[in-house]
Image (spheres, helix red, strand yellow):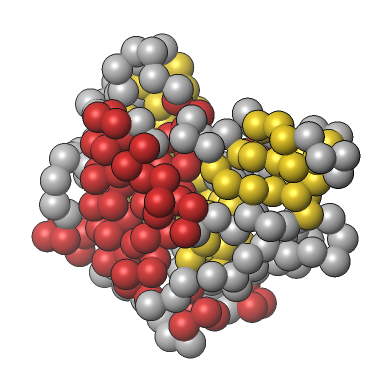
Amino acid sequence: MSDLAPEAVGPLLRGSLGEPYLYTAETASTQDVLAASDHPHGAVAVTEHQTAGRGRSGRRWDDAPLTALLCSVLLRPPAGLPLPRLALVAGLAVATAIEHESGLAAMVKWPNDVLLDGCKVAGILLEASSSRVVCGIGINVNQEERDLPAQTRLPATSLRIGAGRQFDRGVVLAAVLRELECGYAEWLEHGLDGLLDDLERRNALRGRRIRVDGRTGTAGKIAPDGRLTLVLDRGDIVLVESGEVELEPGDSPATG
């Protein structure tokens, strides 16, 4: 039996996330499983392999079957909230769960990646429509070096590579859902205010030389509204709402 099968994961779940639990051996994308349905808040779609997995900006997300944690969570936040900030809430939840389950120091790379030792171990994808948000989470769990893509914007890694052992993906999933439910509740109540200290402690870009939307400078703190502080080369300070962050050659994200 797979460690992601309903029989394995069901006893591990606590709280409202994971009902219903939609498990498939293979699907095009867990995002599509929830986007094409009218499931309630908290529904979770999980698969062993995606044939058309995608990341931010339409990038392809490749996986080795039976090794990664590939899931999507359906959330129904109240109207009027800044939905893009949910990527930070989810990223922090994933980083915290990884640290709890593996002992590895996980960092959040604004706006939607999670890193181990400067290498990407997880990514977040938000797709919103009307009053619903499908939050996609992809975590490299039990891949070996040969299972990971070679040509990526950031080097890829996995929990297995970082910790030198295999993991029960169901246990990791349950930890992620617990952290996400807590972080989501905090965000609904107080925005990012109650999460900022943890986000800043895990801010992988702080002090790094980056380029974003044609502007080059040094990344600073994550602002209370979720924007990234950027100190431009000429000294001006701007707040970046969104964009593709590229590290300057020779620089690398913080490793904790």
Left-right relation of 126 to 118: left
Q: Residue furthest bottom?
A: 164
In the rendered image, residue 45, in percent from the top left (x then y), is placed at 34, 42
In the rendered image, residue 227, in percent from the top left (x then y), is placed at 57, 34
In the rendered image, residue 232, in percent from the top left (x then y), is placed at 80, 40
Q: Residue furthest front?
A: 235
Residue in the image at 13% along x and 52% along y: 14
Residue in the image at 80% along x and 46% along y: 217
In the rendered image, residue 225, in percent from the top left (x then y), is placed at 48, 30
Q: Is residue 172 visible?
A: yes
* Quarter of image, res 157: bottom right
Q: Quadrant of the N terminus?
A: bottom left
In the image, 42 versus 154, the foreground residue is 154
In the image, 21 versus 238, the foreground residue is 238
Q: Is residue 21 above or below residue 190?
A: below
Residue in the image at 43% along x and 59% along y: 95
Q: Quadrant of the C terminus?
A: bottom right
In the image, 136 versus 108, the foreground residue is 108
Left-right relation of 163 to 55: left
* Quarter of image, res 154: bottom right
Left-right relation of 91 to 203: left
Q: Is residue 114 visible?
A: no
Q: Is residue 7 above or below residue 40?
A: below
Left-right relation of 222 to 212: left
